[in-house]
Image: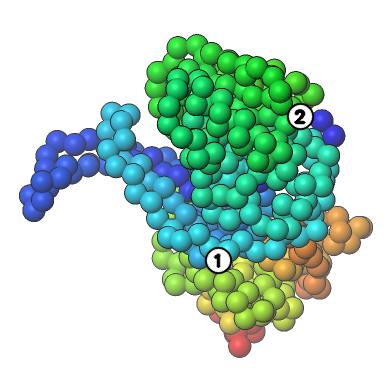
């Protein structure tokens, strides 16, 4: 493979809510679901990307993500799966699909998000990504990404094999795709196939009609538990039977398409790719479906819970600020860190960062993240208090708390124009050596370093407080750090507030 496997399309936030039904609602004859557990996961193109990454491929996802809590959740889940997110701005809300289930069976599906928003323009980095891909999977869920003119032009120009998984509400495939993978109802609807004849004959007519209309090299119509039918130009259709499998079929089409894409990226023939895809999709259903196939790191990502943070802390607050500034054509600035004991050095960096744009979002390491980075005795101040203290500064517009060791997931969702670090990070190489630089480049953002006040260190402050001595303005005291931080915050806030 010369480059990453690129998945392009619409991503949804899927949630499976499991529960028990033991009674009817007293004011209406409907069942009452008592929730026992729930699992969030990326849906649509996001699920196809997760499946590809779980098979060991380097995967980049080009999708549109909204400035809301759902978008932030998707960023976290995708990062946990090892998927590199190249996010386009998305007007409106993140689409969500909630399945209410009882003993593994769907009782009700609840869709949220409303009418599809308009995806924003792709960056130069996205267009280069498509050009250099080893293979591209277009996972269309009818919400606009697959119809974006700039993306379609890049897909038409790439030398990589392109697999197109269509949607009845989506656009036609780009001419010349290697393989299109509609399911049976989609193929019949897209081709406007009249009724009549056997099932295989109808599927063949649909596939040949779509192959000619889209100028596709091949079309594989998936037939559920009966496998798939593959049509090439001027050849007798190839029927690929599936081994017997029963279970939850949600996501089986994504598994089929992602498997075929990976096979083509390795140089397989289309017929070989379809045979492998049928086998993998059947094994996926027999093995328990998406609940069993979802990688462990994704299943383990719990929603962030922030208590006592105020109305400027959390994904909702950050998304609202960013959306407002972007709508006005402003510049979004972000910075990050643990901020365990807020001191004058922190405030100097925050003030300098705020002057570079029209809002400042602070990405704050959660308690679990700080412990992983600093050791079991840290943090001294819990995340809720740290978030509230930062939000109280006049130079901070919102605080976003993240659980991961690095802010990659948070940044992929926020897409700030500028990422700021204090000068102590520019050790020998300058801002271009920061690990965040590659992430910012995905949407055309920039990393910068601002001057940092010497002699201010949270670690030194904690050591000085525990030793009962003064250090760099830290008062000589026998207070433990949790008590002494209040004095430091008062002084720092007085300097930083505007």
Q: Position of residue 133 (x, y in %)?
A: 79, 40
Residue found farthest to the left: 26
Q: Are marks 1 and 2 in contact (CB under 8 Å)?
A: no
Query: In the image, is residue 304 above or below residue 490?
Result: above
| Image coloring type | rainbow
Residue 91 is marked as 1
In primary-sequence order, the first of circles 1 and 2 is: 1
Q: Quadrant of the C terminus?
A: bottom right
The residue located at (78%, 51%) in the rendering is 154
Residue found farthest to the bottom: 498
Q: Quadrant of the N terminus?
A: top right
Q: Is residue 130 left or right of residue 409?
A: right
The residue located at (69%, 52%) in the rendering is 86
Q: Is residue 293 visible?
A: no
In depth, the one of 226 and 491 nearer the eye is: 226
Q: Position of residue 107 (x, y in %)?
A: 27, 38
Q: Secondary structure at mark 1?
A: loop
Count all numbered tags in the image, as a single digit.
2
Residue position for label 2: 265
Q: Position of residue 232 (x, y in %)?
A: 69, 24
Q: Quadrant of residue 233?
A: top right
Q: Position of residue 272 (x, y in %)?
A: 69, 17
């Amino acid at each position: 493979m010369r480059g990453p496997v690129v998945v392009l399309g619409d991503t949804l936030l899927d949630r499976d809510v499991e529960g028990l039904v033991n009674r009817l609602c007293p004011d209406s004859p409907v069942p009452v679901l008592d929730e026992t557990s729930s699992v969030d996961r990326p849906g649509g193109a996001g699920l196809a990307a997760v499946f590809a990454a779980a098979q060991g491929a380097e995967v980049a996802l080009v999708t549109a993500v909204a400035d809301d809590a759902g978008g932030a959740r998707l960023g976290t889940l995708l990062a946990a799966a090892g998927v590199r997110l190249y996010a386009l701005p998305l007007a409106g809300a993140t689409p969500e699909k909630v399945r209410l289930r009882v003993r593994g069976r769907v009782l009700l599906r609840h869709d949220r998000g409303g009418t599809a928003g308009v995806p924003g323009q792709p960056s130069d980095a996205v267009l280069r990504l498509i050009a250099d891909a080893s293979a591209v999977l277009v996972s269309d869920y009818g919400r606009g990404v697959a119809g974006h003119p700039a993306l379609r032009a890049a897909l038409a120009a790439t030398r990589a094999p392109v697999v197109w998984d269509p949607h009845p509400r989506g656009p036609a495939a780009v001419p010349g795709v290697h393989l299109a993978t509609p399911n049976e109802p989609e193929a019949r609807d897209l081709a406007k196939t009249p009724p009549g004849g056997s099932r295989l004959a109808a599927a063949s007519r649909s596939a040949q009609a779509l192959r000619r209309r889209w100028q596709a090299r091949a079309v594989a119509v998936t037939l559920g538990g009966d496998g798939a039918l593959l049509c090439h130009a001027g050849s007798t259709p190839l029927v690929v039977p599936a081994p017997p499998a029963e279970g939850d079929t949600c996501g089986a089409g994504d598994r089929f398409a992602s498997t075929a894409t990976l096979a083509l990226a390795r140089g397989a023939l289309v017929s070989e790719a379809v045979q492998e895809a049928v086998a993998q999709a059947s094994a996926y259903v027999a093995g328990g479906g998406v609940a069993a196939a979802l990688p462990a790191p994704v299943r383990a990502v719990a929603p962030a819970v922030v208590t006592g943070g105020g109305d400027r802390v959390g994904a909702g607050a950050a998304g609202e600020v960013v959306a407002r500034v972007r709508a006005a054509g402003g510049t979004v600035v972000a910075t990050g860190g643990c901020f365990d004991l807020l001191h004058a050095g922190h405030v100097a960096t925050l003030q300098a960062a705020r002057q570079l744009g029209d809002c400042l979002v602070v990405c704050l390491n959660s308690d679990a993240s700080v412990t992983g980075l600093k050791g079991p005795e840290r943090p001294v101040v819990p995340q809720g208090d740290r978030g509230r203290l930062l939000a109280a500064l006049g130079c901070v517009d919102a605080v976003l708390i993240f659980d991961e060791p690095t802010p990659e997931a948070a940044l992929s969702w926020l897409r700030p124009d500028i990422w700021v670090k204090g000068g102590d990070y520019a050790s020998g190489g300058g801002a271009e050596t920061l690990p965040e630089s590659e992430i910012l480049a995905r949407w055309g953002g920039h990393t910068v370093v601002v001057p940092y006040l010497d002699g201010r260190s949270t670690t030194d402050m904690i050591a000085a407080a525990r030793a009962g001595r003064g250090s760099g303005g830290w008062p000589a005291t026998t207070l433990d750090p949790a008590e002494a931080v209040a004095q430091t915050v008062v002084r720092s806030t007085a300097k930083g507030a505007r």
